[in-house]
Image: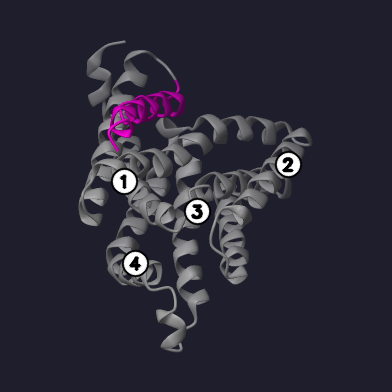
Amino acid sequence: MSLSLVFDPLFRVPFANGLLLALLLPLLGAYVRLRNEWLAALGLAQVTAAGGVTAILVGIHPLAGALGAAVIAAGVKGRTERSGNDVYAVLLFFGWSAALLGAANSVRGEELSHALLEGQLYFTTWLNLGGAIALVAILAGAGPWLSRRLLLEHFFPDHLAANRQAPWRLHLAFDLLVALSVALATESIGVMATFCLVFFPPWIAFRIASSWKRALVLSAAIALAAYLAAFVLAILLDQPFGPVLVGCLVLAGLMRLPFLRHR
């Protein structure tokens, strides 16, 4: 295919949608890794996929089902008052099972399950872009507040309790933000690409960066570079976007290995 297709007006909305997600997800991923909850994206992505398939079965919009499932999952996780990956592992297995069972009982559900797995970035609309813009606005407004408290809780675990503040409220607010972001991203770029954007850039940045702020900047930079490369390559090679993005992020992750030998 011709490189001119990359600049085709048809791809402007999908490009902007994916670009915002590629900026947002690694930043959230850094805090997810800080809390040792890196499995969150995959667990929530599987639950939102199950929600989208279930929505088809009951006759509502898949995005509504995905968002609803994400909110419920985040609410359950937030109320458990537990950090770590164990709760997300349960959500992962439950979501995987529910999504496959739902797909097996619906012709459209099977088609949707493949779409959610591989990603459908080039078919996203202004609705998806509007959701991404709203999430960026929420992160810009609530991000500094959440960041200060998440970092404070990490380095001083008893601070909130000592000041008579309920930790579950902080956890619930953060889990809801992650859940909504993952739900919208899963709808646009697929389950595995969403997980990769949350996992790989912070995984690389945490080894290289010398400070927290630099780790955030580096995470976003790695994700944006991989996204731009994947967007161009997927169009030029006529390949699905999700797998190409995952491949670019995995290659970026492999470049991290030399740093491991020196630390």
Q: Say what secondary structure mark 2 lies in.
A: helix
Q: Would residue 153 appear left or right of 112 to someone viewing this image?
A: left
CA–CA distance in space, label 4 to label 3: 14 Å
Quick one: label 2 or label 4, which is nearer the N terminus?
A: 2
Q: Residue at x 67, y 51 (%)?
A: 90
Name the residue nearer the viewer: 11 or 148: 148
Q: Are marks 4 and 3 in contact (CB under 8 Å)?
A: no
Task: Say which residue label 3 marks.
Answer: 37
Quick one: label 2 or label 1, which is nearer the N terminus?
A: 2
Q: In the rendered structure, find residue 206 and report the number of the disc placed on it.
A: 1
The image quadrant of residue 17 is top left
Find residue 60 and report its horizontal and vertical position in percent. 64, 51
Q: Which residue type carries mark 3?
A: Glu
Return the residue found at the far bottom. Answer: 164
CA–CA distance in space, label 2 to label 3: 21 Å
Task: Say which residue label 2 marks.
Answer: 97
Q: Residue at x 56, y 68 (%)?
A: 78
Q: Nearer the viewer, mark 2 or mark 1?
A: 1
